[in-house]
Image (cartoon, grey):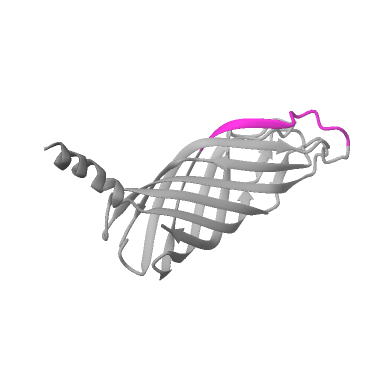
Amino acid sequence: MRTALFLLSVLPLLGQRQELGLLLGGFKPASRTLTVTPPAKADFTAGLTYYANYGIRIAGGGGASLWFEVPFAATPQHRIESASGLVTRDVATLYITPGLRLKFASGRRVQPYIAAGAGYALFEHSTLRGDGRENAAPRTLGRGAFQFGGGVDVAVWRWFGLRGEFRDFVSGSPAFNLPVKGSLQHNALFAGGFVLKF
């Protein structure tokens, strides 16, 4: 009896599959309106993003399957362009937002999915403002974050596939040095790469 119970508890674990996605993407934070006179904006340039995503299947099989995932997105630099020289000159971003991914047609060659999660955003601000003077903003600033989006996997071999993905990472704002309209920062990520399955 104990042996049967042990097998029943272990078999689901043996059936779990893991994935590691390694992608490159373009990360574009939304422009923000500065609440100053005269009116001005803070426009971010797109940044090259290094994006990794670890996932483990927790339910389902050849049809729909549910995965626990940990997305990790790091962008070394976004320039912030503004008519006001008081704004932080540039910022680096890092997002870690664990969540769930629902994959459709898991046993087929083309496998679309949707995903969402929540976690942590880290901003690293430049030491200079746009006018070249010393930046009074904190060097680093942590914020809560959530993300949602979707993508598609295309199986090439049993253990290897291609992946394209879109996500919107939403967080609190970095330190601009000036007040901005709204409290949330939207950041669109378009990424492509490959996924290893094991």
Pick the quarter of the image with the N terminus: top left
Q: Quadrant of residue 185?
A: top right
Residue 184 appears left or right of 85: left
In the image, what residue occupies the spot 50% across and 50% down?
A: 53
Determine if the magenta segment contains residue 144: yes
In the image, what residue occupies the spot 46% across and 40% down?
A: 98
| x and y, in percent, of residue 103 in the image | 35, 55
| x and y, in percent, of residue 178 in the image | 73, 31
Q: Quadrant of residue 25?
A: bottom right
- The magenta segment is 133-145
Residue 131 appears left or right of 164: right
| x and y, in percent, of residue 14 in the image | 30, 50
In the image, what residue occupies the spot 72% across and 48% down?
A: 77
| x and y, in percent, of residue 195 in the image | 48, 60
Up the image or down, 183 lies above or below 155; here it is above
Pick the quarter of the image with the C terminus: bottom left
Determine if the magenta segment contains residue 162: no
Pick whichever, 90 or 122, lies toward us: 122
Residue 23 appears left or right of 118: right
